[in-house]
Amino acid sequence: MIALHDVTKSFHSGKANPFTAIRNISLTIAPARLTVLKGPSGSGKTTLLTLIGCMARPTSGRIVLSGNGISGFPGGEEIRELDITSLPERFLAGIRRATFGFIFQHFNLLRGITVLENVMLPAYPTGERHGEIRKRAEELLALFDVARHANSRVDLLSGGETQRVAIARALINRPSVIVADEPTAHLDTDLSREFMEIVGSFKSDGKTVLIASHDPLVCESPRVDTVVEMRDGRILRSGSVP
Amino acid sequence: MNRSVERHRNVLDFALSSLLRRKGKNVSLWVVYTLIVSLIAAIVFYTHALKREAALILQGAPDIVVQKMVAGRHDLVPVGYVEKIAAIRGVRSVRPRLWGYYYDAATGANYTLMASDDPLPGPGAADIGSGVARTLHLTEGDFLPIRATDGTPTLFQVRKVLPYASELASSDLILLSEGDLRALFDFPRGFATDLAVTVGNPAERPTIAAKIAGQFPDSRPILNSEILRTYDSIFDWRGGMMVVMLGVAVLAFVIFAWDKATGLSAEERREIGILKSVGWETGDVLLLKFWEGAAISLAAFLCGTILAYIQVFFLSASLFEPALKGWSVLYPRFKLVPDVDPYQLAVLFFLTVVPYTVATIIPSWRAATVDPDAAMRS
Amino acid sequence: MRKSTAFSLFTLGNAILLALLLCSGRYGSGEARAMQEASRIVVDRFQLTDLCLFTEARYTRHPSMADLHSAFQDHPMALEHFPSGSLVSPPRFRRDRP
């Protein structure tokens, strides 16, 4: 579970163009559920995602992770509750790497290297044995039915295949939380539906999923558990979908 | 520990994949760098080995050579000096040396003619160095024509060719009897080219040289140590051709490094952003850049030094021969005894690997410290 | 094979080869040593003072015997016109004292 307490994020304060992306947000993301952040661009969805995903720190407020899924703490300790607000950079990066998997709007795969290597990349700096990383990557590619492209260049894949490679990459470090930013923005209806099915499988694996989107196909999908509506950095409405 | 090694190996894997993406460019970069390193290393190896060779071979040179100076130039020395110098305490023997240069117009070669009394080639006979034999296609028993100063050619019969193995010291020598040499060059009686002084105790050489200079103000004594030191300054890095060669190499490297250091392309920046966003920390990105630079420079250093070693010690530095030979027709054949100064090798390693690796890391520093959420925003 | 393994092997192989070459120089090279010894004998017997490397110009043939300004024999500012002159400068001991 991820709990935000009165979180604010401002940029460029003290400089020429200060602006506040998020104001006094308090929110709870339930574990093993699909939560959607809905709202127009500029509403602060992306900023909220970066804060929850340990990519940036809030200007004020607290963010607390709790539950079984927190991993990546040095020493391999079992942590059940962690306030990440003032955690040193190094620890934050380790936790981010092991706990969260990200799927980006533009997929953000590296050109010129193979699909397999792209999927293995996030695990390289952990010092895990190459053979094990490779095995997991191959399994993930098989799971998403792109194993035959393992040694192809990323540039040669279709949109749908690229998306699935991006998803496989997000899962390489066995995260317990998946974060996706506008995942269906470049996909047609069929591929979008396919994506939501995959999200469904995440849920059944017990993973927490957080999606920022204004695509009705996502927001109104039956798989969604909670919708958080945002505008201008604040939450308008937040409620479980019955 | 193990995790650390694995991390390095993983990052190195990706660094190599990254380099192989632009295979043509990076391979030619490596080849050019290797060639530059091999040229510099060959020069370093060659000059060091040759200096060592000279130091060892010339140990048997005279203890002191006495020249006479006239108007600041080397002139013939009166044989009368011999007795007076021999009388100085500590001097074991004084021997006049008679030698000079002979230019053979037919072949364009310069030879050194020397009077030898040990062993004695008879009048009309000559011992020649193997370079002379090679240039003039002579063997024992053949006749060697030499023009005297008045233009008349004299024939000398070759008694012996000096051993091929001694080419480095004797290649261009023509040894004649003293009488023949004096007649050829019209050497005035009572004069010699210079005097070779043998001293009983090597420690006394400088003292005796000082005494000689004191007794004969127009003389210039040259110590054995000074003869050896001459060869320390050949191929001096401050001298003519060396400055040019080193300058070219430095220039090539600066062009290299400039190309690398003038910032990252947008593509590279984007990629670093992606790496940061999928979980690579700043340190990991810098490690990647380190390995990219170190891989190429390390490979260039090793391959370049190996090539240089083979060229200098197995192929007798044949690449340098034209430069050393210059216009001369005669060039000695010799093999250098391999001798590499470990300090020079270490400096070469340092200069090959460190600047290049640093030039690869520094431009990426800024990009590597970008926030991980940058990829989200772009 | 992993790329890093291949690279490590390549590097290690080269390093070993270099080490072998350096050692072979120290302990092998009989022919070169024999040549060195032969030259030593000749120098000793005929009381020679220089190696026979640069036979093109007389001031480069016996650099240890040369005058300070032999190289500039035509004129003190005369440019060097023999290639070996740009490799051999007047011996340092000459430059230190007249």
Image (cartoon, coloured by chain):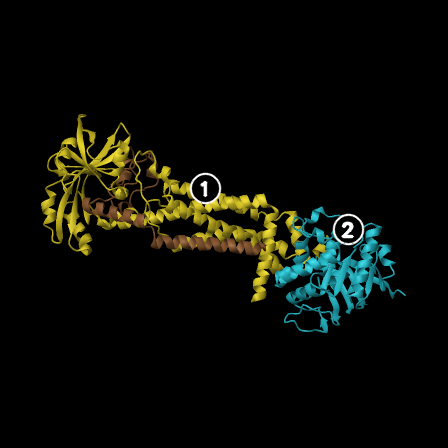
Q: Secondary structure at mark 1?
A: helix
Q: Confirm whether residue C58 shows in the render.
A: no
- The image shows residue B140 at horizontal and vertical percentages of 21, 35
Tell me the amino acid under the disc marked 1.
Val
Q: Which quarter of the figure has residue A178?
A: bottom right
Q: Secondary structure at mark 2?
A: helix
Q: Which mark is residue A160?
A: 2
**Of residues B155 and B82, the one drawn nearer to the viewer in this rendering:** B155
**Tag nearer the camera, 1 or 2:** 2
Q: Which mark is residue A24?
A: none
Q: Confirm whether residue A135 shows in the render.
A: yes
Q: Which mark is residue B248?
A: 1
In the image, is residue B278 above or below residue B255?
A: below
The tint of chain C in the picture is brown
Do the CB atoms of the residues marked 1 and 2 lie less than 8 Å apart? no
The tint of chain A in the picture is cyan
Q: Which quarter of the figure has residue B95?
A: top left
User: Which chain is indicated by disc 1?
Assistant: B
The tint of chain B in the picture is yellow
User: Which chain is indicated by disc 2?
Assistant: A
Which residue lies at the image location 35% right of the left edge and 45% below the top edge? Answer: B236
